[in-house]
Image: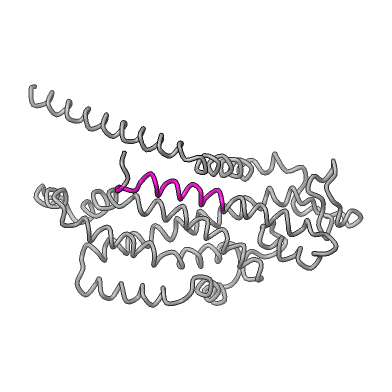
């Protein structure tokens, strides 16, 4: 009974320490004004994307050629485009596409890149050399050119854009996770796990992965913003999401033909892209400051 009481006490103390550390991290995060602004804007955009069918007053594809190029009015808050479609409704539905592409591409690159990087760093040797040479080849291409190359091979469309952007993010996630594993795998807690009979998957994904989370989470947030911006760039070039889907980059690409006649066709989706990318970058910068071990708690 004494042993059980001691174990329970130790477990309770660890839980309290973790809770206290979490509280300190949250407080430091909330003290960053730009982070607070970023969180508010990002949550607002996510809410709009989730409840798009209830927020948008019109279908994003509904056309009314008699009301082309209208400016802001009580019927159409952001005006109408070249086909008489409601721009506000298309912005609302476009948030779904942009957020889905950004988060899915970043998360896909994270999963594959972290697995590759951790296995490479843990095993080392020839396997590590082979993996790193392949990563070097992928990183030798400028990011946007690599995405264009992949889309050109597998075709356009939302799913293919996600695949292309996920592949683009894999090398950096792999390098970050590999570097963390190389630093951590000789630590005492890893040796203790080996001594207790823990197998390789448990050591890698339970001990090493959890302790490598801070830099990975920071890059995940920044990678999401980059993926959203790159997806909009691909759509602008005609290599991303295809018409008639409501997507911000595609709306900018279409609106540039009518810049003098209706500049709001470019300005409104451009502002939507700007606010989304900035809000995610604000959150990512704050996470970096909060999770930096060199800063005092």
Residue for point 46% across, 52% down: 221
Within the image, what quadrant is residue 18 found in? Answer: top left
Residue for point 34% across, 49% down: 214
Place of residue 12 in the rendered image (x, y in percent of width and height, measured from the top left):
22, 27
Residue for point 69% across, 59% down: 245
As for residue 76 lying within the magenta part, the answer is no
Place of residue 69 in the rendered image (x, y in percent of width and height, measured from the top left):
85, 57
Which range is magenta? Answer: 278-294
Is 273 in front, or is 33?
33
Q: Which residue lies furthest to the right in this view?
A: 66
In the picture shown, does residue 63 fall above or below 154?
above
Is 200 in front, or is 47?
47
As for residue 280 lying within the magenta part, the answer is yes
Place of residue 70 in the rendered image (x, y in percent of width and height, measured from the top left):
86, 53
In which quadrant will I find the C terminus? top left
Place of residue 213 in the rendered image (x, y in percent of width and height, measured from the top left):
33, 50
Within the image, what quadrant is residue 50 found in? Answer: top right
In the picture shown, does residue 275 fall above or below 149?
above
Q: Is 77 positioned to the left or the right of 38 in the image? A: right
The secondary structure making up most of the magenta span is: helix
């Amino acid at each position: 009974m004494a042993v059980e009481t001691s174990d329970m006490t130790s477990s309770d103390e660890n839980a309290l320490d973790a809770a206290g550390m979490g509280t300190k991290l949250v407080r430091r995060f909330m003290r960053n004004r730009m982070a607070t602004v970023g969180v508010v804007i990002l949550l607002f955009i996510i809410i709009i994307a989730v409840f798009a069918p209830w927020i948008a007053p019109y279908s994003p594809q509904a056309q009314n050629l008699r009301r082309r190029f209208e400016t802001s009015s009580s019927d159409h808050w952001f005006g109408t485009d070249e086909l008489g479609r409601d721009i506000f409704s298309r912005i609302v539905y476009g948030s779904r596409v942009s957020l889905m592409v950004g988060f899915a591409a970043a998360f896909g690159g994270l999963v594959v890149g972290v697995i590759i990087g951790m296995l490479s760093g843990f095993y080392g040797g020839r396997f590590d050399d082979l993996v790193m040479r392949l990563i070097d080849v992928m990183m030798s291409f400028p990011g946007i050119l690599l995405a264009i190359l992949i889309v050109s091979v597998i075709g356009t469309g939302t799913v293919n854009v996600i695949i292309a952007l996920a592949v683009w993010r894999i090398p950096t996630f792999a390098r970050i996770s590999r570097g963390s594993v190389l630093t951590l795998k000789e630590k005492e807690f890893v040796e203790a796990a080996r001594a207790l009979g823990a197998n390789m998957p448990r050591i890698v994904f339970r001990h090493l992965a959890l302790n490598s989370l801070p830099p990975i989470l920071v890059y995940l947030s920044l990678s999401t913003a980059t993926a959203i911006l790159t997806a909009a760039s691909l759509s602008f070039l005609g290599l991303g999401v295809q018409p008639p889907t409501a997507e911000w980059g595609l709306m900018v690409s279409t609106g540039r033909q009518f810049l003098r006649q209706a500049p709001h066709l470019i300005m409104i989706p451009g502002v939507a892209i700007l606010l989304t990318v900035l809000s995610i970058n604000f959150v990512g910068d704050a996470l970096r400051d909060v999770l930096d071990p060199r800063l005092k708690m």
